[in-house]
Image (cartoon, rainbow, N blue to C red):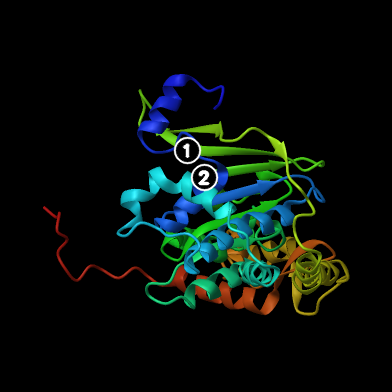
């Protein structure tokens, strides 16, 4: 199973972190049937087939549910959490043996295409639109870094905190989330901390899948991370996705994302000046002249927190002068207002 110490594998099995005989697909189907949760982080160089593989993996899930909903596979009665763990491999194998017609598979692919997001706002919209007992079996967040880079906690702390809060409760609305990106190191920490599967794809579509889990430290109060290979690395078929599916995904969903990213870059690089905005250095100088001891880092932090309005001009951060002067006025009022005496007795007074 892996080269990690046998004792660790034994503990992981004992606590249900890994399951003997399970494939990657088995784990995902288990999460869907038992209202569990998995976060899959897929990475590899651009052009390695990450988006295609994401389509295929989501097809596994939706196809299995289709065979159940249409009576090809009959599930045992009762709460799936009581029986699914032992039966999942058998049920998944049975679903593979079901032969579906082209129209049926096309219907499944249409469902798959409808389960993609590209921005944090898309994630919020999906979750807000769910009914009280509704769960999305799988969501794919393609090209995560385009709209949610790891620097978000510096550049947009509000959005970073919002995604953090959503991810903490996402399992109530989604069973499996799959994200892809070129370099795993650039995955935002609030998502990386929740990853339960790492999928690495080479330029030749050779794929390695690792189960990620944590076990408690033996001597310290800590969580120790381990990775176990759940399947023998192998090459997947890049062309298993029908041509019409790929074209619809590429032209109607992926290219608009690329154009939007290029537009954002153009809007930044084309600006040589912007009326009403001043450089961070100039902003610091104004603060000093008005009695505030703000440095460069303070100005940048207030931009990230939304207190100041920011814009990049010529690749450098600038702030709106009018908003800055309003903030300075408020800060000066706070600094010059005398402290009022206490009108009550503190709890811990003598």
- The image quadrant that residue 292 belongs to is bottom right
- The image quadrant that residue 11 belongs to is top left
Q: Is residue 287 left or right of residue 158?
A: right
Report the number of numbered marks: 2
Q: Position of residue 134 (x, y in %)?
A: 42, 72
Q: Is residue 298 above or below residue 321?
A: above
What residue is at 69 percent from the left and 75 percent from the top? 321
Q: Is residue 146 left or right of residue 84?
A: right
- The image quadrant that residue 231 belongs to is top right
- Tell me if residue 193 can be seen: no
Query: Which residue is more in the foreground, 62 or 228?
Result: 62
What residue is at 46 percent from the left and 75 percent from the top? 130
Q: Which residue is mark 2?
A: 196
Q: Position of residue 70 (x, y in %)?
A: 50, 69
Q: Which residue is mark 1?
A: 213
Q: Is residue 275 above or below residue 46?
A: below
Q: Is residue 10 left or right of residue 277?
A: left
Q: Which mark is residue 190?
A: none
- Mark 1 is surrounded, within 10 Å at the Cα level, by few (under 14), some (14 to 19) or many (20 or more) other residues, namely some
**Label 1 to label 2: alpha-carbon separation:** 6 Å
Query: Which residue is more in the foreground, 32 or 83?
Result: 83
- Tell me if residue 85 can be seen: yes
Query: Which residue is more in the foreground, 200 or 150?
Result: 200
């Amino acid at each position: 199973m892996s080269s990690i110490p046998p004792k660790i594998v034994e503990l992981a099995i004992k606590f249900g972190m890994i399951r003997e005989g399970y494939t990657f697909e088995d784990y995902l189907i288990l999460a869907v049937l038992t209202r569990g949760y998995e976060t899959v982080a897929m990475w590899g160089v651009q052009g390695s087939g990450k988006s295609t593989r994401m389509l295929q993996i989501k097809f596994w899930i939706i196809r299995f549910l289709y065979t159940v909903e249409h009576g090809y596979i009959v599930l045992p009665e009762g709460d799936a959490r009581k029986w699914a763990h032992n039966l999942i491999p058998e049920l998944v194998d049975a679903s593979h043996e079901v032969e579906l017609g082209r129209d049926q598979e096309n219907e499944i692919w249409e469902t798959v295409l409808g389960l993609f997001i590209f921005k944090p706002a898309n994630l919020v919209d999906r979750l807000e639109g769910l009914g009280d007992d509704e769960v999305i079996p799988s969501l794919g967040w393609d090209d995560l870094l385009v709209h949610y880079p790891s620097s978000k906690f510096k550049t947009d702390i509000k959005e970073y905190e919002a995604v953090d809060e959503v991810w903490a409760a996402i399992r109530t609305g989604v069973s499996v989330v799959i994200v892809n990106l070129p370099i795993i190191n650039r995955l935002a920490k609030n998502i990386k901390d929740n990853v339960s599967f790492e999928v690495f794809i080479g330029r030749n579509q050779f794929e390695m899948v690792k189960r990620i889990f944590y076990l408690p430290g033996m001597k310290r109060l800590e969580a120790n991370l381990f990775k176990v290979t759940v399947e023998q690395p192998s090459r997947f078929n890049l062309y298993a996705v029908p041509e019409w599916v790929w074209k619809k995904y590429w032209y109607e969903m992926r290219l608009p994302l690329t154009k939007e990213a290029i537009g954002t870059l153009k809007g930044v690089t084309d600006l040589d000046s912007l009326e009403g905005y001043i450089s961070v250095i100039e902003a610091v100088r104004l603060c000093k002249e008005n009695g505030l001891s703000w440095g460069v880092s303070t100005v940048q932090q207030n931009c990230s927190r939304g207190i100041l309005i920011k814009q990049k001009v010529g690749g450098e951060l600038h702030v709106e002068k009018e908003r800055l002067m309003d903030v300075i006025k408020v800060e000066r009022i706070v600094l010059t207002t005398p402290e009022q005496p206490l009108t009550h007795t503190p709890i811990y007074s003598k």
